[in-house]
Amino acid sequence: MPHARITGVGYYVPEQVVTNNDLTQWMETSDEWIQERTGIQERRYFTYGEETNASMATAAARQALDRAALTPNDVDVIVYATITPDYFFPGSAFLMQRELKMDGKPVIDVREQCSGFVYALSIADQFIKSGMYKTALVVGSEIQSTWINKSTAGRNVAVIFGDGAGAVVVQATDDPERGILSTHLHADGRYAEDLYVRDPGSSRPDRAATRELLDEGGFDVVMNGNAVFKHAVVRFEEVIREALDTNGYTAGDISLLIPHQANIRISEYVRQQLGLAPDKVVNNIQRFGNTTAASIPIALAEAWEQGRIQPGDLLCMAAFGSGFTWASALLRW
Ligand code: UT7
């Protein structure tokens, strides 16, 4: 049976840096509060007219393709994770496919929020294992800066999120020693409203952005931060252990853990629970904030660029987010 292997990684973050101090012009907050509660020092915001969700994804994808020594023509399918698409429909995967001139090639838009990239990777993995496709482009891209409420009322959400994109090329290989060993996906809709954006909801009486809906905050990200935090620390550890158990490994075998960059306190708690040394966990939330579906592929690509990933390494990716969703992928590099 063919096996799926990541053969190229790439990322793109906008140039515009927004520091914690910059945020204080819009809301009552402080650099001290944000760093202490989240670890974040700065994040990137896209520039209107220069960048879009799809253009950032395209830049990340081109870099991943170059590093895999492939061209867009070699790709059989795009799997694109985002909760901030350029249009309500069709999804941004179509816009990236157009940009890469991949006419006729299938695209799949995935949501699944902060777990979106791991879900997308799992979909690509299944296509490759089944023999249906040989090469997939898997991306996560987000523009969060335009929908967060930057007033004091939205500060618990606004300070966390940033913009950016990451991508990987996944290819079929016959080498049983390397590649994706397993993916595990989970969801629990009982907590859907603990982190969500309600509008423009199709089952509302009027999905236009009326003054009333805007005033109600229907278009804002609503988050029960404490609930998200409490579930995240449990589910992260659980889904990482599930990946390890399935493959006969223990936490000590992990070369590098690449968690979704939700909050440095969550990653640090999980690291301690697993008994991992600090250098075994990738943290770049300090510079990019939480970029939802983009955070894992950005962290992966950065770690790879820094030489932190070597052939034979056992990598674990893990995510938790809105839905709730949680997921992991274990791979031998
Ligand atoms: O990818 C998944 C995405 N989401 C997450 O991972 C979120 C997980 N949750 C968290 O990271 C944390 O819950 C937050 C960072 C969002 C909030 O931290 P917290 O320690 O849970 O704070 P809190 O919401 O319990 O609020 C504590 C206080 C409140 O003031 P009072 O009521 O104690 O007077 C808030 O109003 O901190 C206040 N506060 C802020 N103060 C300054 C909330 N946000 C801010 C802010 N700046 N940005």
Image (cartoon, rainbow, N blue to C red):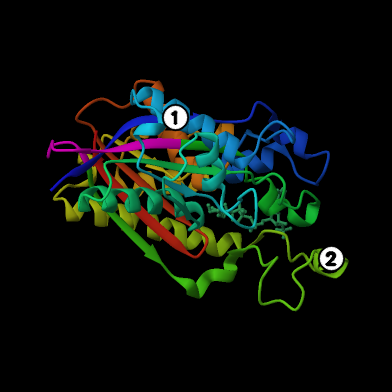
Q: Which mark is residue 172?
A: none
| Predominant SS along the magenta part | strand
Start-end of magenta stretch: 167-179
Q: Quadrant of residue 224?
A: bottom right
Element on which disc 2 rests: helix
Element on which disc 1 rests: strand
Find ligand 1 in the image and state its quadrant: bottom right
Above or below for 306 versus 272: above
Examine the rendering and report whether any part of residue 64 can be seen.
yes
Identify the residue at the far right of this view: 211
Residue 252: horizontal and vertical position, in percent?
Answer: 21, 41
Residue tagged 2: 215
Residue 305: horizontal and vertical position, in percent?
Answer: 40, 22
Q: Residue at x 19, y 43 (%)?
A: 3
Left or right placement of residue 259 versus residue 47 in this view: left
Residue 96: horizontal and vertical position, in percent?
Answer: 53, 40
Disc with the residue nearer the chain's start (1 vs 2): 1
In the image, which is nearer the foreground, mark 1 or mark 2?
A: 1
- Residue 175 located within the stretch drawn in magenta: yes
Of the pair 24 and 93, the residue shown nearer to us: 93
Residue tagged 1: 10
Of the pair 52 and 36, the residue shown nearer to us: 52
Q: Report the amino acid beneath label 2.
A: Asp
